[in-house]
Image: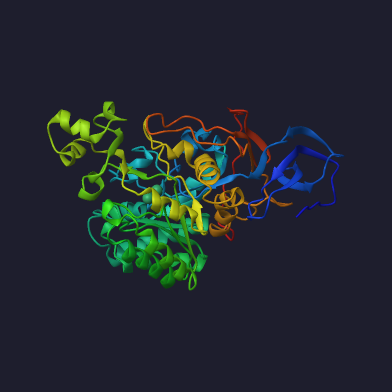
């Protein structure tokens, strides 16, 4: 476990005296880490060595930087490149392009249907090719690394005059070509969001056909499934079927069972997922909250529980308020009030804590925030996901050991998303590291105060550069674009 490579005597950065949790689920061990040229140069007893800069990590855990596998940071990376909401949690890499939503390829001027709007896409100056989007990420580095997927809903919106129907053969061919170009440019996969109106009319067959280029590039398929409620089993089956037809890995995004009538059904879904894993490559992620957040919807099931408005274009003053209260004030039903608040985003309390814990504790579950950086009252997962897993679920509830918690946000994620040189601490790896205090790390963000910075994250290093330290952002923007390994 203690590795050293021809021991250079001098490092650019030396992290001294920390307790290393290396992202492989292996037990922690005491070691120093030497970093040079953005890579880990040595791990071991390095007291005799010198460095330009030294970080005292005694009493702290030294872990690989966290990988947020489920984000909608596609445009935030360019517009708010400090990425404080993520860096402050210890996140050093984000995966964008989830739920069928991506910032490219899109057409200028065209009206975009929800949920694409969640990304805050401008009317003009859009990325009409995926290559242009990746080039912008390269030219304007953010504070975190990024790997990008192509959204199937974006492909549909770009290709079809009307998304409220099935795609015809010509449109499918056009989408295939756009996907192929994106994969060649470095996209790591494609995501779907058949739960949402603009993709709901895409059949299993259409998704398989559009997804054909994934097979040739061995890129992955991630999905916000058609149904995470009554039809959750059928939706899992559809997702596995698409993965088998294409011969590519499947990622079940933000796995959940929602609405009261489905509470407890994770006892069915998890064994079903485990069974599928025996025959094909399947991964899943989860966020540590019982509320979800997405566009304002008016369908029954989601409006049954408590609904908090996160943002509303026509009624920004309603952000942070309960839909119940707004509806009462306006003298209408919740569905009518929701309709009047559209477009916008809301927080829905649709899950059971037991299911969340069961899914989080499932050994193959990765951590992804699904945070949406829109408005002043976002879901607290945007700022709190990772420290919440480490503090609340691992330390306080004892759901799993700290080594497992770290693995779920680093090594497992890098393996499933094929991010070479990330996710584990070893000599030669990219120097993405997070130093935190195992006793005090915790999320601070709540539904009332959702943008509070988490506690206990001491330092965050991205490609060898100290980006967060002692509660402050250093201003560094040393993130890299992680293109698909063989692109
Ligand atoms: Zn989603
Ligand atoms: Cu999402």
- Left/right placement of residue 142 relative to residue 52 reads left
The single residue placed furthest to the left in the displayed view is 331
Q: Is residue 83 visible?
A: yes
- Left or right of residue 484: residue 270: left
- Residue drawn at (27%, 51%), measured in percent from left and top? 260
Position of 82 with respect to 434 (left or right) is: left
With respect to residue 245, does 127 lie above or below? above
Q: Position of residue 268 (x, y in %)?
A: 37, 64
Q: Against 228, is 481 above or below?
A: above
Task: Say which residue appears at 67% left-offset and 42% top-offset.
Answer: 62
Q: Residue furthest front?
A: 397
Foreground: 205 or 295?
295
Q: Position of residue 224 (x, y in %)?
A: 37, 55
User: Coloring scheme of the render?
Assistant: rainbow
Left or right of 14 in this view: 465? left
Question: Looking at the image, which residue is at 33% across and 52% down?
Answer: 158
How far across and how far down the image is residue 469, in percent?
A: 63, 30
Q: How many marks?
A: 0
Please identify the quarter of the rendering in which residue 226 is found.
bottom left
Q: In which quadrant is the C terminus drawn?
A: bottom right
Q: Is residue 98 visible?
A: no
Q: Quadrant of the N terminus?
A: bottom right
Question: Where on the picture, by quarter, is residue 373?
Answer: top left
Residue 461 pos. (x, y %): 64, 38
């Amino acid at each position: 476990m203690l590795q050293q490579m021809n021991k250079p005597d001098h490092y650019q950065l030396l992290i001294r005296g920390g307790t290393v949790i290396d992202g492989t689920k292996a037990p922690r061990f005491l070691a120093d880490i030497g970093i040079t040229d953005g890579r880990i140069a040595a791990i071991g007893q390095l007291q005799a060595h010198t460095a330009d800069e030294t970080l005292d990590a005694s009493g702290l855990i030294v872990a690989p930087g966290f990988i947020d596998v489920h984000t909608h940071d596609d445009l935030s990376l360019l517009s708010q490149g400090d990425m404080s909401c993520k860096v402050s949690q210890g996140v050093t890499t984000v995966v964008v392009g989830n739920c069928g939503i991506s910032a490219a390829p899109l057409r200028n001027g065209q009206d975009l249907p929800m949920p694409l709007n969640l990304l805050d896409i401008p009317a003009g100056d859009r990325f009409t090719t995926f290559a242009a989007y990746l080039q912008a990420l390269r030219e304007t580095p953010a504070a975190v690394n990024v790997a990008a997927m192509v959204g199937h809903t974006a492909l549909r919106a770009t290709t079809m005059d009307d998304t409220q129907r099935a795609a015809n053969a010509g449109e499918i061919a056009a989408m295939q070509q756009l996907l192929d170009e994106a994969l060649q440019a470095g996209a790591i996969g494609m995501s779907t969001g058949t739960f949402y109106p603009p993709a709901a009319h895409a059949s299993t067959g259409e998704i398989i056909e559009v997804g054909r280029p994934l097979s040739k590039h061995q890129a992955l398929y991630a999905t916000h499934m058609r149904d995470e409620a009554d039809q959750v089993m059928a939706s899992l089956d559809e997702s596995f079927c698409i993965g088998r037809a294409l011969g590519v890995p499947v990622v079940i995004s933000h796995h959940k069972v929602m609405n009261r009538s489905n509470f407890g059904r994770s006892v069915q879904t998890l064994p079903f997922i485990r069974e599928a894993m025996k025959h094909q490559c399947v991964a899943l992620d989860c966020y540590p909250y019982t509320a979800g957040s997405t566009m304002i919807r008016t369908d029954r099931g989601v409006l049954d529980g408590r609904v908090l408005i996160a943002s509303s274009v026509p009624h920004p003053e309603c952000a942070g308020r309960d839909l119940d209260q707004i509806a009462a004030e306006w003298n209408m039903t919740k569905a009518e009030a929701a309709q009047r608040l559209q477009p916008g985003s809301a927080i829905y309390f649709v899950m059971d804590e037991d299911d969340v814990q069961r899914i989080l504790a499932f050994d193959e579950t990765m951590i992804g925030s699904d945070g949406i950086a829109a408005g002043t009252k976002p879901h607290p997962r945007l700022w709190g996901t990772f420290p919440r897993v480490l503090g609340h679920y691992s330390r306080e509830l004892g759901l799993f050991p700290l080594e497992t918690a770290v693995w779920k946000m680093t090594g497992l994620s890098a393996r499933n998303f094929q991010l070479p040189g990330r996710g584990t601490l070893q000599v030669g790896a990219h120097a993405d590291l997070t130093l935190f205090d195992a006793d005090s790390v915790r999320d601070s963000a709540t539904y009332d105060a959702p943008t509070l910075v988490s506690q206990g994250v001491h330092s965050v290093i991205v490609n060898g550069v100290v980006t967060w330290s002692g509660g402050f952002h250093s201003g560094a923007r040393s993130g890299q674009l992680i293109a698909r390994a063989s692109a």
